[in-house]
Image (tube, rainbow, N blue to C red):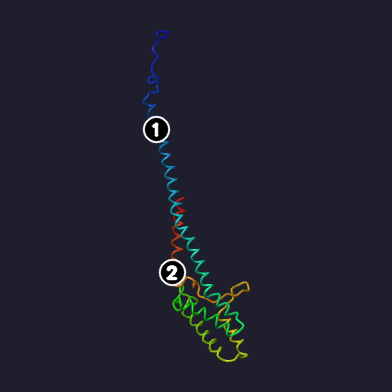
Amino acid sequence: MPGGRHTAPASAKGFPCECRVDFIRNHKSHRKRITMERNKQLDNETLGCFIGFFPLLSLVGWGISMWRADAAFEENCGGHLERAANASTIEIAATELQIAVLYLEKNNITSGKTSVFFTLTGDDVGYWYKNLKAALGELQAMELRPARLEDSNVLINLRQILLKSGGFGGERIVVPEGISVFPNNKKYAWWAIISLAIIVIALMHF
């Protein structure tokens, strides 16, 4: 060595090797902890997406099922009630109304209520069915005799029974709310409520 001096190792210059090793270890531990926290956050987000996907799919299925039930009721009953209300003769009105009533009887839609949580008078299926049945009986009795002037009054009264104002100047048939899914109204209501509740819970994971 020049001048006969001996160079001290790095550990003797105030920065021991042990300190360097501890620093590296602490740095690695810190990075590992950050990585674990990020992975945990990603896992939570993934779990939220996973939990939210199935109730969202269930809610879409609920909407499709409701739409199909509405379409089936409109085709087999609602449409015939509207045609009976707009009929120009007793015979046509009786024919259309009979189709609707037979559909209700075939599917046991003759009593009960469509309400889920609160009972409303407009949700009384039995009262609604009896009105239709009575109107049909009156029309069928009138079919057996010659046409008279009062037939037009009967058709007007029938229209008032079957139709009501639907807003914006339009009219719609008188049916209990949710009649298309009767008697499964409670099942459909809980289906939607549970699906929405799970979706809200899943969103809280984000």
User: Label 2 neighbourhood size at 10 Å, few (<14), some (14-19), many (20+)?
Assistant: some
Query: Which amino acid type is shown beneath numbered disc 1?
Result: Asn
> According to the image, label 2 marks what residue?
186
On the image, which quarter does residue 145 sit in? bottom right
Residue at mark 1 to residue at mark 2: CA–CA distance? 60 Å
Q: Identify the residue at image location x=42%, y=44%.
A: 40
Q: Is residue 155 above or below residue 50?
A: below
User: As drawn, is 68 to the left or to the right of 23?
Assistant: right
Residue 126 at what x, y percent from top left? Answer: 46, 79
| Residue 48: percent from left, percent from top | 44, 51
Q: Quadrant of residue 183?
A: bottom left
Assign a secondary structure to mark 1: helix
Q: Position of residue 74 (x, y in %)?
A: 53, 72
51 versus 182 height, above or below: above
Query: Which residue is drawn at the image coordinates 43% and 50% (left, top)?
Result: 47
Picture coordinates of residue 109, whole percent (x, y): 46, 76
Q: Residues within 10 Å of mark 1 (few under 14, many from 20)?
A: few
Please state which of the two labelled residues, at mark 1 or mark 2, is closer to the viewer. 2
- The reply to whether discs 1 and 2 touch (Cβ–Cβ < 8 Å) is no
Figure quadrant of residue 37: top left
Residue that mark 1 sits on: 26
